[in-house]
Image (cartoon, grey):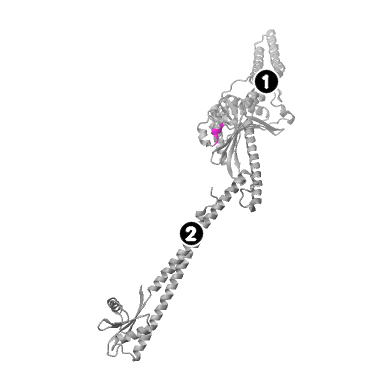
């Protein structure tokens, strides 16, 4: 394992140090070459000026004996080549060196072609510097004194100045590379030893440790390593403990991250998927899981929690089982949703137990009602018996008709008592359908208006147009509404207002029946739904008990608020059913 990556470091150092050094040396060589050439050019210009001055003084006659003049100048200036060029004949008549005169002649003719006779030529070529000064000879000829200085030595020095430092830099850089590689290899090897010691928790390895100076650091790292391992082991133990607690809890628990991937699932929740093992659920996306699920609404509720939607105690029925579903978003410290948690509670046995307790309660109520029932039924039977005896003694047809009406009335009263009693005692299957509460009210609205008009009562019906469909038994709901409205009408003997309202909430639908009657005393509200308890002189005391039974069979709740001389309001709260419960119904 390489702890120090040497290649990137070498490339970086090369770019930072080597390249600037090369260009700095190149810049210095170019400056030195240009200075040398400029100095040679200055010397050549000076010599050309001196030769021109000598000719102008009249002491030398170059046209009379050009060779002698060139030899004299060459002795004075041996480093320069001097040539005399006659313009009229376009030829070199004397030179201080053995050269091919044709190239120089061609060059001078081309250089002076567009120049006047008194203009000089001054150029720097690749190998030399050439300066041609116009001169006039005594015999009337005109021409040029040409001074040539060789600069090939400067060019050679320039190349050597570039090559030698470059080679030296490269050699030094190679040595640095080798040294750096050796140091990095040694450093990596020592780090490997140090890492091995830290991994093995070896606190005393003097035979292995190459640098005793870092032994205190190693000991500190070793202690920190032990602390980290202890913390990691505690974390593993706590995680394992938490997993056991999750698996032992009777609640089904499932958690997902912000992408919908399942991160945790306990054994109870895995039982809902008998075809898949618990470990296979981890890592799956909840969307793909819901496609194969027998209760996809649970997964949909958990997925909706990622958008902040909270599901609290939603009842779900599937495969003859009853579940309570909870779904909550999971937030981080910045209140950003990072996942969701779903909890499923199987309350099938609790529901069965509750139904059994209700049955036992009804049996107890039946036992308690037996005496009251016998008394209530005996009263109309006694009246019937008395009138039958009178009918035996008196045969007056008019009186017999009155007696028969009374007998029929008492028989109807006995039948009502028996019917209400049976409604309380039976635990029959209740067929429910998806139906709108407003529609049920519309079906009995004509009957309610007729009864209200007969009692001189103003009936006000307020229906929420956004009311959702509910899983209801329409016959029992009609009986519920009729019982509550009749109680309200009977409490307003002198007339008043009776309100029937439906209200749609986010998680429930409400049915309210409000009257403006005399109200119910507060001390009697707790007994209001007990069988045979009544505040009316002619009441049986079974009407509200039947209403409570109907409400409970619809998993709803009934609440009553009353104030004397103001009126009474009955509120029934129906839970909004989800799609799974609708299908189960």
Q: Which residue ends up furthest to the front in the rendered image?
A: 207
Q: Helix, strand or loop at disc 2?
A: helix
Quote the CA–CA distance across marks 1 and 2: 99 Å
Q: Nearer the viewer, residue 342 or 558?
A: 342
Q: 259 or 384: which is nearer to us?
A: 259
Residue 239 shows which numbered tag? Answer: none
Return the residue at label 2: 174
Q: Please state if 311 lies on the left or on the right of 537 as rendered.
A: left
The residue that mark 1 highlights is 360
For mark 1, does the 10 Å Cα neighbourhood hold few (<14), some (14 to 19), or many (20 or more) residues?
A: few
Q: Quadrant of residue 345?
A: top right
Magenta segment range?
278-282
Residue 52 quadrant:
bottom left
Above/below status of 134 relative to 459: below
Residue 145 visible, this angle = yes
Residue at coordinates 41% horizontally, 68% vertically from top-left? 159
Q: How many marks?
A: 2
* Residue that appears at 58% across and 50% down: 191
Look at the numbered disc 1 and give the secondary structure of its residue: helix
Q: Nearer the viewer, residue 457 or 96?
A: 96
**Can residue 465 be seen here?**
no
Furthest residue toward top = 392
Question: Between tags 1 and 2, which lies in front?
Answer: 2
Q: Quadrant of the C terminus?
A: top right
Q: Main secondary structure of the magenta part?
A: helix
Q: Is residue 392 above or below residue 107?
A: above
């Amino acid at each position: 394992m390489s702890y120090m990556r040497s290649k990137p470091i070498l490339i970086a150092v090369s770019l930072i140090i080597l390249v600037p050094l090369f260009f700095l040396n190149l810049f210095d060589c170019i400056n030195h070459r240009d200075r040398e050439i400029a100095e040679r050019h200055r010397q050549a210009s000076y010599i050309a000026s001196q030769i021109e001055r000598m000719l102008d003084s009249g002491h030398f006659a170059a046209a009379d004996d050009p060779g002698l003049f060139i030899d004299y100048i060459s002795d004075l200036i041996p480093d320069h080549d001097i040539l005399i060029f006659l313009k009229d004949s376009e030829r070199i008549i004397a030179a201080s060196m053995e050269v091919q005169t044709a190239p120089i002649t061609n060059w001078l003719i081309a250089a002076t072609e567009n120049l006047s006779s008194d203009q000089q030529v001054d150029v720097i070529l690749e190998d030399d510097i050439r300066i041609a000064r116009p001169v006039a000879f005594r015999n009337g000829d005109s021409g040029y004194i040409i001074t040539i200085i060789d600069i090939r030595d400067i060019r050679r020095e320039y190349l050597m100045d570039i090559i030698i430092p470059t080679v030296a830099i490269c050699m030094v850089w190679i040595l640095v590379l080798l040294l750096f590689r050796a140091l990095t290899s040694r450093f990596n090897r020592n780090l490997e030893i140090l890492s091995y010691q830290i991994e093995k928790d070896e606190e005393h390895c003097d035979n292995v440790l190459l640098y005793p100076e870092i032994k205190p650091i190693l000991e500190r790292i070793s202690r920190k390593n032990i602390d980290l391992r202890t913390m990691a082991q505690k974390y593993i133990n706590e995680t394992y403990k938490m997993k056991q607690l999750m698996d032992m809890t009777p609640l089904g628990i499932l958690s997902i991250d912000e992408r919908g991937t399942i991160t945790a699932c306990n054994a109870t929740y895995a039982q809902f998927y008998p075809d898949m093992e618990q470990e296979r659920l981890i890592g799956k996306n909840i969307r793909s899981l819901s496609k194969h699920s027998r209760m996809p609404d649970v997964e949909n509720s958990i997925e909706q929690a990622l958008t902040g939607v909270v599901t609290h105690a939603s009842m779900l029925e599937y495969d003859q089982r009853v579940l309570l579903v909870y779904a909550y978003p999971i937030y981080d410290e910045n209140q950003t949703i990072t996942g969701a948690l779903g909890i499923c509670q199987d309350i099938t046995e609790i529901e069965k137990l509750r139904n059994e307790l209700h049955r036992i309660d009804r049996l107890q109520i039946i036992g308690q009602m037996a005496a009251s029932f016998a008394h209530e039924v005996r009263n109309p039977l006694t009246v019937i018996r008395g009138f039958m005896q009178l009918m035996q003694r008196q045969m007056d047809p008019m009186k017999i008709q009155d007696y028969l009406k009374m007998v029929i009335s008492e028989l109807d009263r006995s039948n009502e008592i028996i019917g209400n009693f049976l409604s309380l005692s039976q635990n029959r299957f209740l067929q429910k359908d998806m139906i709108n509460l407003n529609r049920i009210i519309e079906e009995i609205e004509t009957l309610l208006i007729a009864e209200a008009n007969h009692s001189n009562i103003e009936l006000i019906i307020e229906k929420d147009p956004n009311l959702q469909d509910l899983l209801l038994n329409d016959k029992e709901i009609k009986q519920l509404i009729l019982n509550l409205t009749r109680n309200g009408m009977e409490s307003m003997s002198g007339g008043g207002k009776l309100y029937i309202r439906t209200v749609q909430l986010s998680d429930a639908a409400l049915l309210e029946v409000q009257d403006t009657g005399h109200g119910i005393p507060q001390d009697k509200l707790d007994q209001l739904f007990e069988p045979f308890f009544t505040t009316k002189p002619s009441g049986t005391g079974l009407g509200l008990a039947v209403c409570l039974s109907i409400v409970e069979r619809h998993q709803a709740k009934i609440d009553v608020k009353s104030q004397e001389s103001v009126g009474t309001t009955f509120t029934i709260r129906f839970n909004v059913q989800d799609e799974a419960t609708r299908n189960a119904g």
